[in-house]
Amino acid sequence: MLKITHLTIVLFFCLAGNIVLAQSGNIRGIIKDSRSGETIVGANVIIEETTIGASSGVDGSYHISNLQPGKYNLLVTFVSYHK
């Protein structure tokens, strides 16, 4: 019985270690007009070729979370602006 308890504890820590080491990334930023420098409220920020994205808030900021580490291309759209 004692061996089963030790084995259970070892397995628990091995599995917990994998969960702790799992990584996810975030993309954050602020959308601003390139000429005036004013923040843009309600701009859509989308990771190209996915359906993952966010809209900028009242301060022009956006946040996309729970991403796998890697490189991403972002597409920003807003009415009357070019992509």
Image (spheres, rainbow, N blue to C red):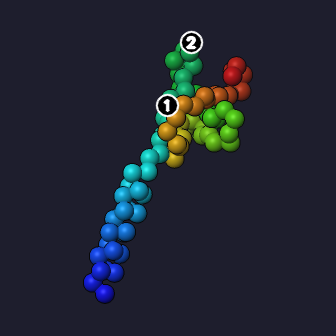
Instruction: Compare marks 2 and 1 and give the one earlier in the sequence.
Output: 1
The CA span between labels 2 and 1 is 18 Å
Q: Secondary structure at mark 2?
A: loop
Q: List the residue tagged with mark 2.
A: 35
Query: Is 15 rendered above or below residue 79?
Result: below
Q: Where residue 44 appears, x then y in whole percent?
A: 64, 34
Residue reaching furthest to the front:
3
Callout 2 amino acid: Arg
Residue 45 visible, this angle: yes
Q: List the residue tagged with mark 1.
A: 29
Callout 1 amino acid: Gly
Residue reaching furthest to the top:
35
Residue reaching furthest to the right:
80
The quadrant of the picture occupied by the C terminus is top right
Q: Where residue 20 appears, x then y in whole percent?
A: 38, 55
The quadrant of the picture occupied by the N terminus is bottom left
**Foreground residue among 10 and 41:** 10
Q: Residue at x 57, y 31 (%)?
A: 72
36 relative position to 49: left or right: left
Q: Where residue 76 appears, x then y in whole percent?
A: 64, 28
Q: Could you say which quadrant of the image residue 48 lies in?
A: top right
**Foreground residue among 65 and 14:** 14
How packed is label 1: few (under 14 Cα within 10 Å), some, or many (20 or more)?
few
Q: Residue at x 68, y 42 (%)?
A: 51
